[in-house]
Amino acid sequence: MADIDEKTAKNVPGKFYVDSSCIDCDLCRETAPENFGRDEDEGLSYVKKQPSNDEEVAACEEAMEGCPVEAIGDDGE
């Protein structure tokens, strides 16, 4: 389960976030490319844009459920 205290710095404020346990597998960026980006310096994914419609919310939830290390969190905002 993602740890909000380990949230990476590049995440934009909002409901979804990526924590430091990310292994840079690319699943989230493939599943929700509008919402997840890659921090080239750290080799981690981050939330670059919070979802703005139901389709993006569903894609972010799918990415969160599919994350192999559970690095994507939903803080309920």
Image (cartoon, rainbow, N blue to C red):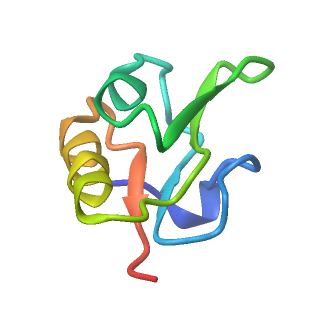
Task: Looking at this view, name the residue that lies furthest to the right.
Answer: 41
**Looking at the picture, how far across and down is residue 66, in whole percent?**
19, 36
Q: Position of residue 34 (x, y in %)?
A: 46, 39
Question: Is 50 on the left or on the right of 58, as rendered?
Answer: right
In this rendered view, identify the residue nearer to me: 20 or 16: 16
Q: Does residue 47 sit above or below 3 in this rendering?
A: above
Q: Residue at x 19, y 45 (%)?
A: 62
Foreground residue, 61 or 34?
A: 34
Give the quarter of the figure containing the N terminus: bottom left
- Give left or right: position of 41 versus 59: right
Q: Determine the residue located farthest toward the bottom in the rendered image.
A: 77
Quick one: 32 or 72, which is closer to the camera? 32
Q: Is residue 14 above or below residue 1?
A: below
Q: Position of residue 23 (x, y in %)?
A: 48, 22
Above or below, comparing residue 40 to residue 68 in the picture: above
Q: Quadrant of residue 37?
A: top right
What's the residue at 42%, 43% (across, down)? 71
Q: Is residue 63 above or below residue 75?
A: above
* Residue 43 image point, x, y percent: 66, 18
- So how many labels did they put on this image? 0
Which residue is pictured at 61% across the width and 27% down the height?
A: 44
